[in-house]
Image: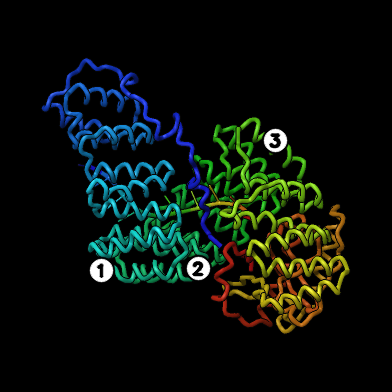
Amino acid sequence: MAVRDLDTHRTNRVDLGEGGLWVTKPLSPDIKKSSIPVTSDTNTQFIQQLQDAKDLNFVLSSHSKLLKSGFSNQTFPTNHLLNAYVRCQNMRRAHQLFDEMPEPNIVSWTSLMGGYIAAGYPMMALSLFAEMPKDFIVPNAFTLSTAINACAFLADVNAGKVVHAYIEMHGYQKNLVVCTSLIDMYGKSNDLVAARRVFDSMLERNLVSWTSMINGYAQNARGYDALELFKEFNRIQPEPPNKFMLACVVNACASLGRLVYGRATHAVIVKGGHESNEVVACGLADMYAKCGCIEFSLKAFRSIRNPSVVPYTSMIVSAAKHGLGEVSFDLFEEMICKGIRPNHVTFLGILYACSHCGLVDKGLDLLTWMQTRHGVVLDLKHHTCVVDMLGRRGRLDEAYRLAKSIVIQKCHEIEGALLWGALLSASRLHGRLEIAAEASKWLVEAGQQVDSAYVTLSNTCAVAGNWDDSQRIRSQMKHVGVSKEPGCSWVEVKGSVYVFYARDVSSCPRSDEVLSLLKDLGERMKERGYVGGSSGSVFVDVEDEAKEEMVSLHSERLALGFGLLSIPRGETIIIMKNLRMCRDCHEAFKLISSIVERDFVVRDVNRFHHFRNGSCTCRDYW
DNA sequence: ATAGGGTTAG
């Protein structure tokens, strides 16, 4: 599955504004006549002024000056004007100017490509690149790294390989920047072998190339490789890491859920004086939250002077994950008061908060409000959140109706699988077999999450007491050759990671204690008013269960994102995913830590790279 | 004159 979010790059945007890109309109009427004539003496001055111009009005008046000066057919000054339009992100005018140039050169082409990427239209950059040979324009290193950058935004490894081949053929494979773009592109296309091959082939490297490679690992859920490379960087390179690199390293720690590494990185950040950087601090807040330390997370967030929409959104989600819905809503209100405009991710975050705090109606109100007041166009991901929100609370019919009403295109099946997957888990949670069957059918047909679709359907049958079907589905899995990775959970105690498998009896020597604690926690939850759901645990006692996903049928806990508690007989263990840190879990942690320290062997944690948003938990008092 | 790296959901 693609780790990266492509939507943020607006790859599918076709609306180019102002009547469309290809509709050329005469620009002259908009350009004010200037009384100051431009002579060849003032040409240099003209260029100097344009070099850092970001104001469109200034650029427009410069344009009219250029027209009057009679130099408008010259490539050099016109390229400066073109760049100024690009800097203003006015691609319509930039492209118009480009079209009017008698002799655009490689710089004109490259600038225009770069502008399109910055404006969110990487496809346009690639079409320009493809058109260049027709005009007998030969790409240079600047053009090639720009083209690779467009492929990176699209995560289009095939296009990237074509450009890569050109690079090799024309001897640009020694160029530092070109290589760095290649590493970035392969990393974002999830081809780490190719990325590493480029990295290893480089004769010289700088901070940017190291960062690109480290980030390649971090973005592909290979946190340990990222940290390993960071260590190597520190060993080999004399210069200290900068904020870019450290932001990537913190991200790697977050994805591993390994507090010890996160804290060590935090120390490096403080030492280097990068703590005040917003992106770094936001990464730290995210890391602490994912490592289970919401207090530190909030502290890191509060250290940001004027948080932008990204840290606010991040913190809203983190608080919600820890069950602090009120904090999420307070943060949301706070950002609105400060005049910070929520974006589409913020709305996902706030829906996520409603979903995980059981506030369905509030979530639905917000949904209407965001459409009417903020003009947000709902996309697949928002709908997935809503399906999840309704489903968790048992409003399965509404969730189902919504899911059915959404048309999922072939190219969005990965995202679509999240929607149907959410519906499937909700069906299992509430024992809605017929919906579970349809959802898993969708997933199997789309070829998405097939293994868990089977297992979840089988478990739904078990919840409904339909043991025969449950078994039948398992046999079917064997028959069609589908198997699932063993479900596991892990916890970090004093810097070591302990891994627990579902139904791995040998790994829980004190299961009686654990089970009685779980039962006790369940009781206390009920006392707090969490109703519904069977509080008993149900298992499918088949041989392969050890390889199955964790089954947890403490449904209310699941429903509230409270943390999975898992399976007895095989007598398990504790899952601390999304646990509410602030309440009873303290006690659970203590027990677990005493058990693991005395009786457990550290497992091979490297196997668990692929758990991207590790929810392993740890506190300092351990 | 034009090129490369970082944070947020599921």
- The residue pinned by badge 2 equals A222
Q: Nearer the viewer, residue A196 or A10?
A: A10
Assign the N terminus of chain A to one quadrant of the image. Answer: bottom right
Q: Nearer the viewer, residue A202 or A506?
A: A202
How many numbered markers are drawn? 3
Q: Chain of mark 2?
A: A
User: Would you say A436 lies left or right of A160 here?
Assistant: right
- The residue pinned by badge 3 equals A368
Which of the two discs, 2 and 3, sits closer to the camera? 3
**Figure quadrant of residue A268:** bottom left
Q: Residues within 10 Å of mark 1 (few under 14, many from 20)?
A: few
The earlier-in-sequence mark between 2 and 3 is 2
> Residue A333, can we see it?
yes
Please provide percent x and percent y for residue A610: 56, 69
Q: Chain of mark 3?
A: A
The earlier-in-sequence mark between 3 and 1 is 1
- The residue pinned by badge 1 equals A203
> Residue A508, can we see it?
no
Q: Is residue A43 above or below residue A507?
A: above
Amino acid type at circle 1 is Leu
State yes or no: discs 3 and 1 in contact (Cβ < 8 Å). no
Q: Residue furthest bottom?
A: A506
Secondary element type, mark 2 = loop
Instruction: Identify which residue is drawn at 74% across, 80% down.
Output: A544
Instruction: Identify which residue is drawn at 38% across, 59% down.
Output: A160
**Figure quadrant of residue A62:** top left
Amino acid type at circle 3 is Thr
